[in-house]
Amino acid sequence: MINQDTFRFIDLFAGIGGLRIGFEKAGGKCVFTSEWNRFSQQTYQANFNDNHEIAGDITAINEADIPNHDVLLAGFPCQPFSIAGVSKKKSLGRAHGFADETQGTLFFDVVRILRHHQPKAFLLENVKNLLSHDKGNTFRVIMHALDELGYEVDHKVIDAGLWVPQHRERIFIVGFRRDHPTQFSLDDVRLPEGERPKLSDILHPEDGSEPIEEPYTTGPMAKVSPKYTLTPRLWQYLQDYKAKHRAAGNGFGYGLCEPTDVARTLSARYYKDGSEILIAQSNGIPRRLTPRECARIMGFDMPNAKDQWKIVVSDTQAYRQFGNAVAAPVATAIANAMAPWIKNTVSIRPIRSVVA
């Protein structure tokens, strides 16, 4: 099915393609994509040249109609397992986790596709809280299902903050089919060396050294558009909200950042008020990140990149997409660690026996 130059993979619950970026850089070719959100589909299509259409609802797709592949990628929906998602569903009296029929069982679509195609390997991504959801029972169900399919599985929580200036912990689950033995470990993923990135690495410089990109920047110095500065009313609300919770002994509230800081996790709710990552300004009222800065803080591109990530949707949709995405440099690092085993370019190392 493969040679030493390339391998075939499928991209499920693809979002805007964060996982795909990494596996294409590692030599893979995407042969099937599934993503139900039409706005994410627009962004995905604008940034990838495909000879296949994006499939919608994976539950409506027969696994036999999916092309053969070597690797399955899936950032399966995390809402039923995330802390925020669980809290919201509990407050509404709704089920969560695998009891949530709308999203919690989507993991089993991954299972049925793995069972049918038996690809050489897979990579799954989810929120860190997946480990502790339902006192660990959810994760045990997932690991048991993957084990029964005949895969040797490893998992690890990795913080994208090693690559990009935000604290973003996600769990990655890798499996290789047992009849394709490897010595792969997520501990083999190569981590960046040197100083950790800071927000100054991704913020608009606003000094004329960056081309103007409307509607994000404007004027001769490419200053950030005033539209991203909070209204005085919203800024006052956020300050009052934080003060109220501080008085109650809680840590809730906005995150105000300087260029030398590392941000909190960018979330899909960022479009609402931007409160988790606010950039301090000299006038005393902070601003949101622009969507271009969100692309950078997720590692989809960097300042003055030759080929910038195409943002073809509204700010609201762009914030949602980047907040839900997989940080591209993390996917690339994992793909680079997996690729030699997928391509058969490395061999099992003999285990040396220790002689007393």
Image (cartoon, rainbow, N blue to C red):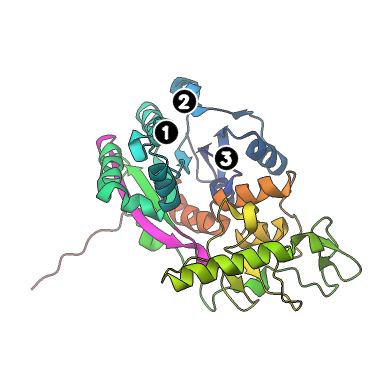
Q: Which mark is residue 53?
A: none
Q: Position of residue 274 (x, y in %)?
A: 63, 59
Write the residue at 76% across / 64% down. 304
Q: Position of residue 283 (x, y in %)?
A: 76, 76
Q: Please determine whether, in this image, residue 98 is positioned above or below residue 286.
A: above
Number of numbered discs:
3
Amino acid on which disc 1 is placed: Leu
Task: Specify the quadrant of the image occupied by residue 251.
Answer: bottom left
Crowd around label 2: few <14 · some 14–19 · many ≥20 (10 Å): few
Amino acid on which disc 3 is placed: Lys
Crowd around label 1: few <14 · some 14–19 · many ≥20 (10 Å): some
Task: Specify the quadrant of the image occupied by residue 308.
Answer: bottom right
Q: Please determine whether, in this image, residue 131 is positioned above or below residue 148.
A: below
Q: Earlier in the sequence, mark 2 or mark 3?
A: 3
Q: Earlier in the sequence, mark 1 or mark 2?
A: 2
Q: Position of residue 85 (x, y in %)?
A: 44, 47
> Circle 1 sits on which residue?
106
Amino acid on which disc 2 is placed: Thr
Q: Which mark is residue 29?
A: 3
Depth check: give the residue in front, 261 or 284: 284
Q: Which mark is residue 59?
A: 2
Write the residue at 54% across / 79% down. 195
